Image: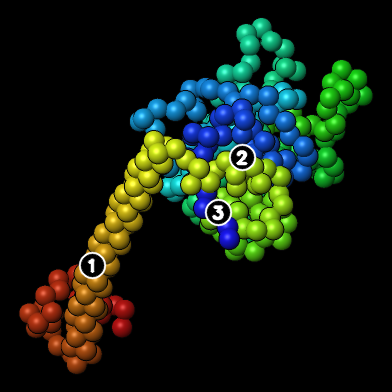
Amino acid sequence: MPKRLVRFDWAMKKLLRNKANFSILEGFFSELLHRDITIQNILESESNKQTDADKYNRVDLLALAEDGELLLIELQVEGQFDYFHRMLFGTSKLITDYMASGSKYREVRKIISINIVYFDLGQGVDYIYKGQTEFKGIHKNDLLKLSALQQKNLPQLAHVAEIFPEYYILKVNDFDNNAVDTLDEWIYVLKNSEVPDGFKAKGLAKAAKELDVMKLSDSDRKKYERYLDDCRSAESSIETSWLEGHEKGIEKGIEKGIEKGIEQGIEKVAIEMIRDGESNDKIRKYSGLTDDEIEGLRVAQ
């Protein structure tokens, strides 16, 4: 029987920052990036400091990989129409935050931005997207590569795209719960907060053990339950606002529809009177239309 785990957003705030649990994050990163990742440290910055005032719907975690890459996880529950812009801002700020004064451009850190979203972001049919920067010729459609001089002086690079931030978007709610590979197993866990028997993705065995709700101390369990209550309350407020707006929209639509119907009915009566040869005075009396409106209808016939 699957174990019930704490939500990943709460785990990122409380449990995954512990060095003893780095293997959970390392497993997730390794499955997503398709290469072994070792975390050296969890960093703090202005964008990911945790305070009591933090919004429930946004969680940031910044990890420093052993090879110097900065791995940024952003988890977003509530919809945000300009979220793509926020992704760009987040990586741009990290580049400048971690660029020492007087450093050479070649020392710019590689940023990998991993965005776990629980709302419908953009328009597409997949649930995992990857974005990276490449330069293609407008006329020849060739891919711009590193020159011989660059290859000699930047031996750690194989492609130009490796310099620029790399983005991943995981649209969790679009996943159909059918795990066909180990990355899907992680998506399943992110969506359902449980690890089914037989899952073998890196980091999940540790997650099942360390993120088990039943293993929380009494103090942490109370904090977690309070956090869930806050989430439910916030989600309920969002849903209520949406429903109220939807109902008002329907009411306004009905009112406009009635107004339009009355307007069309009046015009129909006026047109019939015009066809019967009635005068403008009589048409104006029974329809309430102005002389200009009546003449407009006459011209249209």
Foreground residue among 218 and 276:
218
Label 3: which secondary element: strand
Mark found first going from the N terminus, 3 or 1: 3
Image depth: mark 2 or mark 1 in front: 2
Disc 1: which residue: 251
What distance separates the C-alpha of mark 2 from that of mark 3?
26 Å
Residue shown at 64% from the left, 32% from the top: 22
Q: Which amino acid lies under the numbered mark 3 shown in the image of this protein?
A: Lys
**In the picture, residue 2 is in which quadrant?**
bottom right
Mark found first going from the N terminus, 2 or 1: 2
Which quadrant would the N terminus be assigned to in this image?
bottom right
Say if residue 235 shows up in the picture: yes
Which quadrant would the C terminus be assigned to in this image?
bottom left
Disc 2: which residue: 114
Label 1: which secondary element: helix
Can you say whether 28 is above or below 41 in the image? Answer: below
- Is residue 296 rendered to the left or right of residue 173? left
Estimate how packed mark 2 is, as few (under 14), some (14 to 19) or many (20 or more) residues with alpha carbons within 10 Å: many
Residue shown at 72% from the left, 31% from the top: 38
Q: Which amino acid lies under the numbered mark 1 shown in the image of this protein?
A: Glu
